Amino acid sequence: MRQAVVLAGGLATRMRPRTLTVPKAMLEVAGRPFIDWQLERLRACGYDDVVLCIAHLGEQLEAHVGDGARFGLRVRCSHEGGKLLGTAGALRAALHLLAPAFLVTYGDSYLPFDYASPLDALLAHADCEGVMSVYKNDGRWDASNVETDGVWVVRYEKGGTDAALDHIDYGALALRREVIAALPDGVAMGLEGVQSRLATDRRMRAVVAAQRFFEIGSPEGLAALDLKLGESR
């Protein structure tokens, strides 16, 4: 079994008013709900088990995806409940569903690379607790936040301005279950703290992606991905 966790519980405020009635992962891209594209990419990269961490309007996403069989997947949902828990908090709430090692990605990210590569690297190396996919961004697509030597994430600093931070968190991270089990339950927190700690402790390896990432978290990002996927049909 190869497991991917998709974090799809955010409020998507930048995409309002559309996301007042539709969860971000269900926004239409090239004629289909975005989640369809994402699940197909995960299946094509060898994943067969998916956990969806859902909150805002999550019942629509759960109803649309169902058990995942039509995508060739087993899909289960983890509900955050009435309190938004952030990216790390949502993973902690899904602890009972997590495999010993898994990939985590975001419900608004479309990544033109091999989603299997971070998990493959984690399973191949016992000297790390996480593997982050990174891209040499140089501040182009968003603020760069990673320093890497090509093998390790040397530093992860969200909001940093140091020129050495020339890569960016690409949006696919492999983790061991015990990293999440060590977090307090029911507390809202982001993954950035986990990623920063693992980098500081030299426990986070890196895989470097060759192509830019796409996202639907902004109108501009959605338009760019709509064009890309529309051309591929």
Image: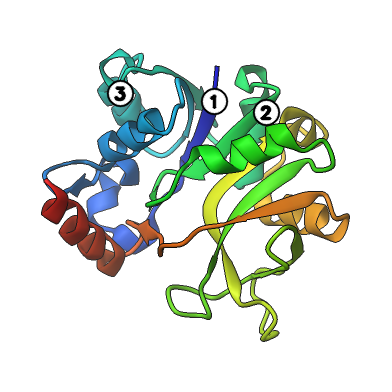
Dot placed on the residue nearer the N-terminal end, 2 or 1:
1
C-alpha separation, residue under disc 1 versus residue under disc 3: 16 Å
C-alpha separation, residue under disc 2 versus residue under disc 1: 8 Å
Q: Which element type, helix, strand or loop, lies under badge 3?
A: helix
- Across and down, in percent, residue 86 comes to 60, 46
Residue 85 shows in the view: no
- Between 80 and 33, the one lying in front of the other is 33
- Across and down, in percent, residue 230 comes to 13, 53
Dot placed on the residue nearer the N-terminal end, 1 or 3:
1
Residue corresponding to mark 3: 65
Give the residue at x 61% y 31%: 102
Give the residue at x 44% y 27%: 46
Q: Nearer the viewer, mark 1 or mark 3?
A: 1
Instruction: Give the quadrant of residue 41.
Output: top left
Residue corresponding to mark 1: 3
The numbered dot on residue 101 is: 2
Does 112 sit left or right of 149 as displayed?
left
- Dot 2: within a 10 Å radius of its alpha carbon, few (fewer than 14), some, or many (20 or more) residues? many
- Across and down, in percent, residue 205 comes to 73, 51
